[in-house]
Image: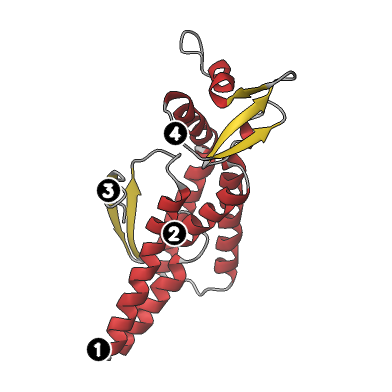
Amino acid sequence: MGILFKWKIEKIIILPFGALTIFNEDLNRKLKEEFLIAIMGPMFQIIFTFFLYYLGVQNAVYYSISILCFNLLPIVPLDGSKLLNVFLNKITSFKRSHAFIIMISFLTMFMVIINTDFNLIFILILVFLFMRVFSEIKNHDSLFNRFLLERYLKSYRFKKIKKINSQDVRKMKRDYTHLFYDGFKYVSEREVLKKRFDFKGKL
């Protein structure tokens, strides 16, 4: 699905709970594309599980269902977090969506920890997930700046328009073109972002 939408695949990491595809793409790609790419992982796992069931490989069926359920947990970078991220970006701003994903990831990991028996594989997976979530925290502001910078440098064509009665860029959403109120009239998001990104001086 990523290839179909011409997303640039940076690398694929093989993990105990499946494969993790890392894309090198704009943060402003359409939410519809991101949703279809994210949903294909669980869909393939469901089809694969039915195939194993048809073959009568019961142990493999149980393992496949376990991987499916685990990947649907809303923890970065699992498929569940990607699907939830699409939903959150539909209803709120990019910056707030990312903050919610981080909080939900921590809360879900805490629930998993108190309800799961520890073993070596579980500990290794947990360490990996904690590292990824902490990386999201560390990169929260830079990710938001990248989101804004893409909007400033590139011309995205979004049909939906959102009016913001201030010049607060933190309210910007994906899949929307924004108009900001400067106290007298509405101005384009490019005009507002131009004040933020001054390449002759500082960022």
Which is nearer the N-term, disc 2 or disc 3? Answer: 3
Q: Amino acid at mark 2?
A: Leu
Q: Amino acid at mark 1?
A: Leu
Earlier residue among tags 2 and 1 = 1
Q: Quadrant of residue 162?
A: top right
Find residue 156 and name its label. 4
In the rendered image, which quarter contains the N terminus? bottom left
Question: Which numbered disc, 1 or 4, marks the residue that appears first in the sequence?
Answer: 1
Residue 35 vertical placement versus 157 (above, below): below
Q: Residue 37: x, y in percent?
A: 38, 56
Q: Is residue 39 left or right of residue 180?
A: left
Asked whether 10 or 2 is in front, the reply is: 2
Return the residue at label 3.
11
Mark 2 → mark 4, Cα distance in angstroms = 28 Å
Which amino acid type is marked by label 4? Answer: Tyr
Disc 3 to disc 1, how far (Cα)? 32 Å
Which comes before the other along the chain, label 2 or label 4? 2
Write down the residue under mark 2: 78
Residue at the image point whose x is 48% and y is 24% from the top: 152
Q: Nearer the viewer, mark 2 or mark 4?
A: 4
Dot placed on the residue nearer the N-terminal end, 3 or 1: 3
- Could you tell me which secondary element the residue under label 3 belongs to? strand
Residue 57 shows in the view: no
Local secondary structure at mark 4:
loop
